[in-house]
Image: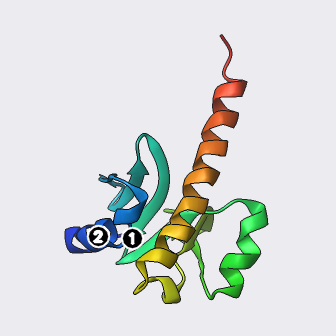
């Protein structure tokens, strides 16, 4: 896992139409936030966006790949994040469209976590 701040600046510019995003280093990569919603990961110069089960076929069809990482024991884990389609990397409008889907997925995930938290 690796994060280059120049990639973070590129992502900020690409997603400018989404609003003010925040990027925070984590585990060698970086998390991408809108307000307090964690909706993306930047790792090895790739932006990965949160995707719900029903969105995954669209990501796969667009040529995206799922975010994976190796555990210490060599086991490969995957997460519910998919790479921004290549066609969106040079098209801010398309990139923001995908990012909005990711923000909504993050919003639903956060709402589900709060609903299950005991009082």
Q: Which quadrant holds the N terminus?
A: bottom left
Does the rendering let one see residue 50?
Answer: yes
Few, some or many C-alpha atoms within 10 Å of disc 1 (few <14, some 14-19, many ≥20)? many
Quarter of the figure with residue 52: bottom right
Pointer 1 residue: 43
Q: Which callout, 1 or 2, points at the residue further toward the start of the chain?
A: 2
Mark 1 to mark 2 CA distance (whole Å): 17 Å
Along the horizontal axis of the image, is 119 left or right of 14?
A: right
In depth, the one of 103 and 70 nearer the eye is: 103
The residue under the point 49% across, 62% down is 72
- Which residue is at a point 42% across and 49% down the rendered structure image? 34
Residue where numbered disc 2 is placed: 13
Determine the residue positioned at 61% across, 52% down: 104
Q: Which image quadrant is residue 117 in?
A: top right
Percent x, y of residue 88: 48, 83
Question: Which quadrant, please, contains the C terminus?
Answer: top right
């Amino acid at each position: 896992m690796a994060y280059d701040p120049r990639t973070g600046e590129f992502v900020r510019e690409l997603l400018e139409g989404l609003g003010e995003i925040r990027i925070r280093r984590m585990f060698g990569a970086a998390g991408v936030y809108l307000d307090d919603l964690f909706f993306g990961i930047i790792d090895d110069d790739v932006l990965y966006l949160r995707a719900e089960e029903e969105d995954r076929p669209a990501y796969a069809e667009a040529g995206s790949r799922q975010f994976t990482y190796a555990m210490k024991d060599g086991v490969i884990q995957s997460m519910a994040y998919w790479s921004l389609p290549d066609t969106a990397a040079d098209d801010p409008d398309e990139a923001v469209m995908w990012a909005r889907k990711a923000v909504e997925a993050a919003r639903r995930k956060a709402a589900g976590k709060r609903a299950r938290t005991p009082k």
